[in-house]
Amino acid sequence: MTELDNPVWWALTGRQRRFGRTSRSAGLFDPELSPFGAFSGLPADSQWDDLAGLIGPSGQVVLVHPGDGVDQLPTPEGWTSHRRTQALQMTGEGMIHRPDPPTQPGPGPLVAPPDRPVPLGADDVSDMLALVEVARPGPFLPRTVEFGGYVGIRRAGRLVAMAGERIRPPGHVEISAVATHPDHRRQGLAEAVVAAVAAAAHDRGETPFLHVAASNAGAVALYESMGFAVRRTITFELVEAPPAA
């Protein structure tokens, strides 16, 4: 099993250790940052006990694990699997860096081109949460921005598109929270924010990757046009620990 087969575990035991908790064989991010957790490998009952100790009685966590139909996680007695979602994991080794559009030529001060992604941070969280509410890109919480690397596009002061960085296994960074307001879709904004985050990753010598719902053919086609390639299927599974004895 490589780092990208189990990205949450490798992130939690590496560069993002400060964002979560781990035991010998299980780990999870701080639930105020992210709902995700993982095992060190395919778990036995003792590893499920480790996870239960981290999340507490009736606690919930979204496990991220290989999900090609062969190695689904069998939940032991007392655990409840609420939902499994299959996603395609796509990597961006083949991306071609596209420079920013040129600024306006001619005399006078240079004018920034429209729709250029700009950094987002803690002061932008309320706008980011509002965009997530209508665009529904997946889990994004008030502290998720602490993962860093978020960029967005504003029109008339309103945040209409964004993307950022989330899971960081060795040598890689996940592009996440790709969101475009429904009133501004099909205008190249998603491509612009994804390209900006991917370019920053490449500049650091990292390979960008992302997860997209296997059923979202439009998004898959967009990412393929940008140079991403499908690597494998990954499963996101919401599980609940046994209640207190």
Image (spheres, rainbow, N blue to C red):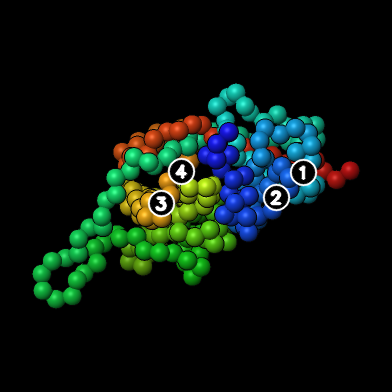
Q: How many other residues sit within 10 Å of disc 2, few (<14), some (14-19) or many (≥20)?
A: many
Q: Which one is in front in this view, the residue at disc 4 or the one at disc 2?
A: 2
Q: Quadrant of residue 99?
A: bottom left
First along the sequence among labels 4 and 3: 3
**Could you tell me which residue is drawn at 50 percent across and 64 percent down?**
125
Instruction: Give the spatial CA distance, label 4 vs label 2.
Output: 23 Å
Q: Residue 184, how many percent across, how many down?
A: 34, 52
- Please name the residue that numbered disc 1 is placed on: 50
Q: Residue furthest left?
A: 106
Q: Which mark is residue 205?
A: 3
User: Which secondary structure, mark 3?
Assistant: loop
Do callouts 4 and 1 mark residues in contact (Cβ within 8 Å)? Answer: no
- Please name the residue that numbered disc 2 is placed on: 22
Residue 88 visible within the image? yes
Split into 4 quadrants, where in the image is the N terminus?
A: top right
Q: Nearer the viewer, residue 80 or 98?
A: 98
Do callouts 4 and 2 mark residues in contact (Cβ within 8 Å)? Answer: no
Q: How many other residues sit within 10 Å of disc 3, few (<14), some (14-19) or many (≥20)?
A: few
Q: Residue furthest top?
A: 70
Q: Residue furthest bottom?
A: 108
Q: Which mark is residue 24?
A: none
Instruction: Give the spatial CA distance, label 2 vs label 1.
Output: 9 Å
**Could you tell me which residue is drawn at 18 percent across and 75 percent down?**
109
Q: Which mark is residue 210?
A: 4
Specify the amino acid type for callout 4: Leu
Specify the amino acid type for callout 3: Gly
Do callouts 3 and 2 mark residues in contact (Cβ within 8 Å)? Answer: no
